[in-house]
Image (cartoon, rainbow, N blue to C red):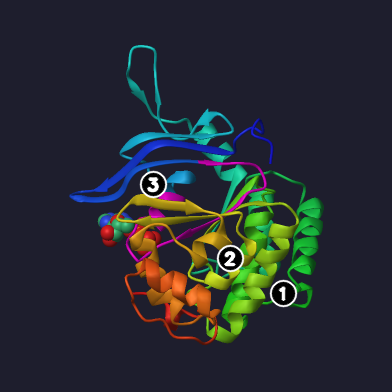
Amino acid sequence: MSGAAPLVFRLEGVTKDYGPIRALDGIDMTVRPGEKICLIGPSGSGKSTLLRCLNYLEEPTGGRIWLNGEPVGHTIDSVGRRRAPSEASINRLRMSVGMVFQSFNLWGHMTALQNIMEAPLRVRRLPRAHARDLALGLLRRIGLEDKQHAYPSELSGGQQQRVAIARALAMEPQVMLFDEPTSSLDPELVSEVLDVMRTLAQEGMTMLIVTHEMGFAEEVADRVIFMDRGRIVETAEPHRFFRRPESPRAAQFLARVVGRGRARSGSEQHDLRATTGGEETETGRLATSKTERET
Ligand code: ADP
């Protein structure tokens, strides 16, 4: 990626406080077009809050965020007054930034097709026939064309999450945010959702993914960002990160979450143990289910 490519997101010193809790503590980062970034870290480290600040579901307490060079959220006028964002600018932001949540959030009274058509009709104001064609095309892409008339209650969790991804894509967003999209799924349904995300990644979508699926992160991410206590502790190329994390905190986290689940070569095991101060790791399959997450 050229260093001169325009940035999708730029964050400077972003903080977020919930009363006495500092959920984000000075986040600086950039996201380039087409980049896939996996956000990894222990529960409560601020990953979800960071995503929610990016699409203005949460207003940061401090610092600044830009999307395509435009400020996200409030602006400061020429005399230093804080100005709330206009509804139009929030709508523009939400059209550019799609979000997929852990809990699907589909509308229960609408079919899969209607769920996907809703935003193109209401927000993008596409003609109904156009919105329908778009939605059917997306259902085909996620392999659920035959479920177009099914209601969410008639779909498995994996199918619901695929529809939720299609619904976000129906806005033709520039970037997609995924907040633990497979965490509430039964293990056997995880792969169908990861397959859809993998295809999206291969198609060049810019993606920020909070995930505990370490194998997927290593395969898909251009960069892994490891967070702890509201801070970015380490940013790394994934293969290096999963083999030789630099920070003791990341090494300790990986030893607990991945180390016990990953078959490593002797030297790789040695590397990880060296950085964790001799903590034992076990071998086995990749950590791919919520039961293997660090809690
Ligand atoms: P993660 O996604 O890494 O698990 P979160 O971003 O959900 O972490 O949470 C970071 C911290 O902020 C945690 O201490 C959490 O309890 C707190 N937090 C998150 N959302 C809220 C909220 N709406 N109100 C109060 N505290 C919150």
- For badge 1, the amino acid type reads His
Does residue 9 appear to the left or right of 56 in the view shown? right
For the residue carrying disc 2, how many other residues have a C-alpha within 10 Å: few (<14), some (14-19), or many (20+)? some
Three-letter code, disc 3: Glu
Residue 31 highlighted magenta (yes or no): yes
Asked if ligand 1 lies within 8 A of label 3, the reply is yes
Residue 77: image location, x then y, percent: 39, 17
Residue at image point 66% right, 49% down = 171
State the separation of the CA atoms marked 2 and 3: 29 Å
Q: Which residue is mark 3?
A: 58
Residues drawn in magenta: 30-51
Relative depth, front residue between 154 and 253:
253
Is label 3 in contact with label 1 (beta carbons under 8 Å)? no
Q: Which mark is residue 10?
A: none
Mark earlier in primary sequence (3, 1): 3
Q: Earlier in the sequence, mark 1 or mark 2?
A: 1
| Residue 155, quarter of picture | bottom right
According to the picture, the residue beneath numbered tag 1 turns out to be 149
Image point (66%, 77%), residue name: 192
Q: Which residue position holds label 2? A: 218
Q: Mark 2 vs mark 3: which is more N-terminal?
A: 3
Per the image, is 173 magenta?
Answer: no
Residue 258 in view of the camera = no
SS category of the residue bearing label 2: helix
